[in-house]
Image (cartoon, helix red, strand yellow):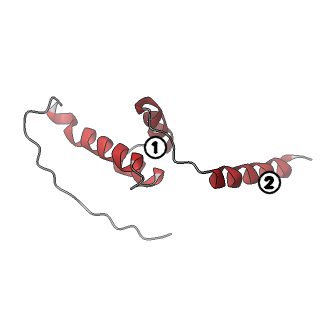
Amino acid sequence: MARTFVKRAVIEVSEGLRIPPGELEERLRIELALRLYEKGIASLGQARRIAGLSKWDFLELLAREGIPLHYSEEELREDLEAAKKLAGNTRE
């Protein structure tokens, strides 16, 4: 398994935000993850880990926020090919 290095960032936020103090860190992590994914800076996996969410929860969040998936035609072809192979393996 590849070794992953983590960097920590500290952000100073004024008290004027209308976010309950107990939700601030989680909310900022989610907002950061959404914007990094939306701009193509972070992959889906990277963004969902930043947000601290499962893949499916992050996909639901993207849908609610109206952020489209970054899914190319090449990725679609690869997924269809994999699905065909799996379907062929299950037939008897």
Crowd rating for badge 2 (residues with CA inside 10 Å; few <14, some 14–19, many 20+)? few
Name which residue type carries label 2.
Answer: Lys
Would you say 75 lies left or right of 65 here? right
Q: Residue at x 32, y 42 (%)?
A: 30
The CA span between labels 2 and 1 is 27 Å
**Which mark is in front, 2 or 1?**
2
Q: Are marks 2 and 1 in contact (CB under 8 Å)?
A: no
The picture quadrant where one finds residue 20 is top left
User: Label 1, on which residue?
Assistant: 54
User: Label 2, on which residue?
Assistant: 85
Where's residue 59, x and y in %?
49, 39
Q: Residue furthest right?
A: 92
Q: Residue at x 30, y 41 (%)?
A: 31
Say what secondary structure mark 1 lies in.
Answer: loop
Would you say 51 lies left or right of 87 here? left
The picture quadrant where one finds residue 62 is top left
Where's residue 53, x and y in %?
41, 43
Where's residue 81, x and y in %?
75, 53
Where's residue 39, x and y in %?
39, 49
Tell me the number on the disc at residue 37: none
Q: Nearer the viewer, residue 67 or 90?
A: 67
Say what secondary structure mark 2 lies in.
Answer: helix
Would you say 1 lies left or right of 83 here? left
Q: Is residue 71 visible?
A: yes
Would you say 68 lies left or right of 10 here? right
Q: Nearer the viewer, residue 1 or 40?
A: 40
Name which residue type carries label 1.
Answer: Ser
Q: Residue at x 81, y 47 (%)?
A: 87
Q: Earlier in the sequence, mark 2 or mark 1?
A: 1
Q: Residue at x 30, y 46 (%)?
A: 32
